Amino acid sequence: MKYAVTYTKNFRHYDEVDEVIFPYKGISDEEGLIEIVTNTLTREDQRAIILVDKYEQSIDDLIPIVRKLKTVHENMTVSLNFDYQHEWIGKLKEAEIPFMFVNFATTVTQIAAMAIFGAKDIYIAEDICFMIPKLQILREMDGIRLRVFPDILQTPRRCASLPQMTNFFIRPEDIDLYEKYIDVIEIFRKDSRQSVVYEIYRQGQWRGPLADLIIDLEEDISGASFIPDFGKARLNCGRRCAMTDCDICTYSVEVGRQMEEAGIAFVKQKKKREASEEIKKQAEEIMEKMEQADDNK
């Protein structure tokens, strides 16, 4: 599993990350872009992704710049807008320049459409992230590389009234669960805290308020106060709470709050101190629900 970040001047770990996204500002910024890419990427196996999100840019201006960049760093991909830049695809293919789409796929149909156009890297988001193991056939048969953002609460449009914990995000403690299913973990945060967030996910542990780490999350709960296997239960649940009476996520939050009040935290499967019998019982009930849900798949 690789890690990606968007280029910012203050990021501290460019020697470690596998991919860096560089925004393309137009032909007037050609020399600046080439200099930044050259100075930022220190390893041959790192990939530069040139982001062209604004559709008014010209493909005829971009291709010569990418060719220049490839003379100093071969591993190069262009990220374009699926909605506005369809006419770019033929020219990128003709120039033998790999490309992907900046847009997120939230359905299997959208993934298939992007793959048919020729994108090998595809961002998946929102509810489809609750069925990631079922998407592995795309990786095996079509060579699709799946990308996710772990550090933002992914709420489907017009569904803001749903309990926040039922939406997709990944806790640092659960990141290892996705290693065999996801190709790229891309840090969504692009502000001054990007380095810190990256470090936390690489370390796989966060004991502070989860809302400080996950963008748009407002739940008042510590990152350490979750029952074991919380992430495992969500990995392939298919968002069953939308169709059944499953309440594992929301119930986990309530148990987590009680654990916090009692000074108890599960950290890397180790408990800070012994839980009370009542909290143990609640945790066991949740685990039993998880097992029953797995049996019914």
Image (cartoon, grey):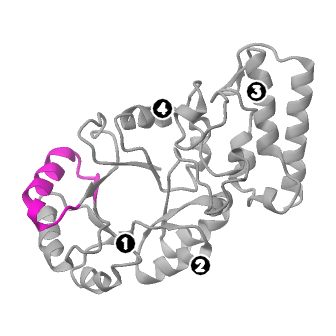
What's the CA distance linking mark 2 and mark 4?
33 Å
Q: Of marks 1 and 3, which one's residue comes earlier in the chain? A: 1
Whether residue 260 sits left or right of residue 53 in the image: it is: right
The residue under label 3 is 257
**Res 109 label:** 2
Residue range of the region highlighted in magenta in the rendering: 24-49
* Residue drawn at (85%, 52%) of the image: 246
Tag 1 secondary structure? loop
Residue 43 in view (yes/no): yes
Sequence-first disc among 2 and 4? 2
- The quarter of the image holding the C terminus is bottom right
Q: Amino acid at mark 4?
A: Ile
Q: Residues within 10 Å of mark 3 (few under 14, many from 20)?
A: some
Q: Position of residue 254 (x, y in %)?
A: 80, 33
- Residue 152, above or below 114: above
- The residue pinned by badge 4 equals 200
In this rendering, position of residue 232 left or right of residue 12: right
At 73% from the left and 20% from the top, the residue drawn is 260
- Residue 9 is labelled as none
Q: Dot 1, how many residues are within 10 Å of its Cα: few (below 14), some (14-19), or many (20+)?
A: some
- The amino acid at mark 2 is Thr
Whichever of callouts 2 and 3 sits on the residue coming sooner in the sequence is: 2
What residue is pinned by disc 1? 81
Which of labels 1 and 2 is toward the front? 1
Q: Amino acid at mark 1?
A: Asn
In the picture, measured across the screen, residue 279 lies left or right of residue 203, that is: right
Residue 204, can we see it? Answer: no
Q: CA distance from mark 2 to mark 3?
A: 39 Å
Residue 124, horizontal then vertical, whole percent? 54, 62
Q: Residues within 10 Å of mark 4 (few under 14, many from 20)?
A: some
In the image, 147 versus 154, the foreground residue is: 154
